[in-house]
Amino acid sequence: MLLPMKPTEKDIALLERYFDAELNEEETKYFASRVEQDEDFNALVKREKVIIGAIRNQGLLDNLAYLKSIEEKIEGDHAIPFYANFKTWHYYSAAAVIVLLIAVKFLFPSQQQTSEQLFTSYFKAYPNMFEPTLRGTNEITNRTEAFQAYEHGDYQKASLLFSELLKENREPGMLLLLSNANLMLGQVSEAQKNLVTLIEESDELDIQAKWYLSLSYLKSGDKENARKMLKELGETEISYASKAKELLEKVD
């Protein structure tokens, strides 16, 4: 009998990005094909869901009994033996996180986060996946300068250049990066305007646009529209669904 392959660091990284809803469209398709065609990888996903569910859905545990039940479930699940070699550090790390959550609950009474705090916790500027700049590029244009400025965190310059370039050609990717630059600069109303335009004009990046639009609503204190957008995302099967559901639960 052949033993299943031990998961690689690449597999683990892919899995972590999946549960953090950070996969792009191409990676999402690749992930789905791996789950369908690779039994070992499918087993890895199932195992991980046990731990992820414990951390995300049982963050406010009343006692250590739940931790014990999770450990028993892991040990008693014989249908996926190949993952046992990997669980030594991975599961015990997750168990330590659960214990920490319990300790925090009893030692420090939880306080509901404000809209601004939730925005800060969940906002992460979208990476430039559309036109990565390369070192040693001979020709420097407004276009290359715009993407370089965004990658280097010069959002003021990127915002100005993207705005000028979009007057000539309304590219979805550029519009998404501009809205992110707006949010980094605190230009919330401008970001919302650009995100709504992106949703109305293109289906290519409307999911990403809705996620950042929901965050922009939180930043501006518009919880009602934030809830509507998060609920819409949470009812889909897209990569942002789990993160949208998680955030929705925290919006009072």
Image: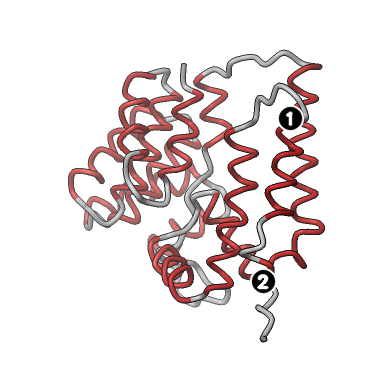
Task: Kindly identify the residue that appears in the image at 42 percent across and 46 percent down.
Answer: 240
Q: What secondary structure is marked by label 2? A: loop
- Between 50 and 112, the residue placed more toward the observer is 50
Quarter of the figure with residue 45 = bottom right
Q: What secondary structure is marked by label 1? A: helix
- In the image, residue 167 lies at what x, y percent? 23, 50
Q: First in sequence: mark 1 or mark 2? A: 2
Question: In this image, 12 relative to 142: left or right?
Answer: right
> Can you name the residue that lies furthest to the left here?
201
Question: In this image, 5 relative to 199: left or right?
Answer: right
Q: CA distance from mark 1 to mark 2?
A: 28 Å
- In the image, residue 241 lies at what x, y percent? 41, 44
Give the answer, above or below, for where 137 lies relative to 166: below
- Between 160 and 84, the residue placed more toward the observer is 84
Task: Kindly identify the residue that appears in the image at 76 percent across and 26 percent down.
Answer: 102
- Between 245 and 196, the residue placed more toward the observer is 245
Looking at the picture, the colour scheme in use is: secondary structure
Instruction: Please name the residue that numbered disc 2 is placed on.
Output: 7
Task: Kindly identify the residue that appears in the image at 66 percent across and 57 percent down.
Answer: 77
Give the answer, above or below, for where 17 lies relative to 118: below
Q: Quadrant of the N terminus?
A: bottom right
- In the image, residue 199 lies at what x, y percent? 24, 44
Q: Which mark is residue 177?
A: none
Instruction: Please name the residue that numbered disc 1 is placed on.
Output: 101
Question: In this image, 80 relative to 21: left or right?
Answer: right
Task: Kindly identify the residue that appears in the image at 36 percent across and 51 percent down.
Answer: 238
Q: What amino acid type is highlighted by mark number 1? A: Leu
> Can you name the residue that lies furthest to the bottom here?
1
